[in-house]
Image (cartoon, helix red, strand yellow):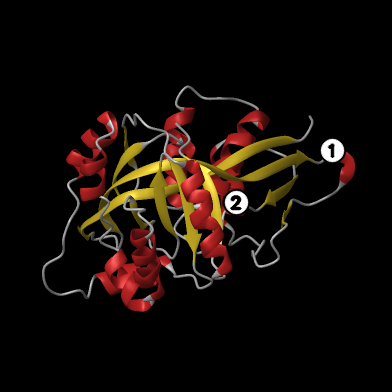
Amino acid sequence: MNTIVVKALAKINLAIDVLGKREDGYHEIDMITIPLKLHDSVEITPFPANAHLDTYLYCDDPTIVCDESNLAYKALNAMRENFRVNGDFRMMIHKRIPVQAGLGGGSADAAAVIKALDNYMHDSPEDKDRIEHELALTIGSDVPFCLYDKPARVEGRGEKLSQIKVKCPYHCLIVKPNIGLSTKSVYDAYDLIEGEIKHPDIKALIKALEIDDEKGIKENLINVLSIPAIKALPLIQDLLDKMNTMGLVLSGMSGTGSACFALHKDKKLLERAKSIFEKQDYECYLTEFAL
């Protein structure tokens, strides 16, 4: 069989609320997540049975660790354990999504491997989708959404997905400082926060997206994890302030950072902003919602 190429879509979180820490150590979350057209490309090529070659993973970004700790490799092993996926493969990741950005790049790559390996199953059980959803969660909390790749309200620790309607396919500017943040450190710092926290109204945001009420969207672009992220990296607040000064009021931080986003219907306005941020040595990407 020939090489299969799957797009691994980035995501942004328009709002994140943390409802508490669970007994299993994870956090109960409630968030709105949107897939973007910005994507990695994952290639899967099977080796001939008589080639005597072992599976290997390669990424064109030399900073990416390509051993069995990589989520894409974990996805392969999970598929082998749960389905009749035999043989060895060459797995290539062409990286476009920035790392340690809160854009779900590693999770998207893992989901892309699962989708690609569907083509190499020797059997396909009736409950394949359920099994894949469950094994996706064992790989990472964002992997179920990346399998789904549709605008959604995401709850639980990432396993509860409810599709939402989004009227406007906003253009999206991604701006990332040259310093990343680890997901664990941001969540750990969130648990130590004292005092009142402003939380998003998730239902109101869903309604605003459905009818394209920009005022309602703006009011609920709230990511509670931005509080500890900004304490760790004040540059995030500086970046958000600059976006607001430019008139990019539909802005926020995605995931646990450090990337921030700005939404607008005017692509040229975002192009001008991108040029300004690039001159300030930010890593920038111009994309749009994948609806």
- Compare residues 138 and 267 and report the one nearer the observer: 267
Q: Quadrant of the C terminus?
A: top left
> Mark 1 = which residue?
48
Q: Which residue is mark 2?
A: 72
Q: Is residue 100 above or below residue 90?
A: below
- Quadrant showing the N terminus: top right
What is the three-letter code of the residue carrying label 1? Pro
Residue at image coords 52%, 53%: 272
Horizontal and vertical percent for residue 233? Answer: 39, 76
Q: Is residue 242 above or below residue 19?
A: below
Whole-angstrom CA distance, mark 1 to mark 2, is 21 Å
Q: Identify which amino acid the numbered label 2 is placed on.
A: Ala
Which is more foreground, mark 1 or mark 2? Answer: 2
Q: 10 Å neighbourhood of mark 1: few (<14), some, or many (≥20)?
A: few
Q: Residue 281 versus residue 275: which sits nearer the camera? A: 275
Residue 251 numbered mark, or none:
none
- SS class, disc 1: loop
User: Which residue is at a point 57% across and 39% down the rendered structure image?
Assistant: 114
Q: Is residue 21 left or right of residue 269?
A: left
Left or right, 136 with respect to 89, comes to left
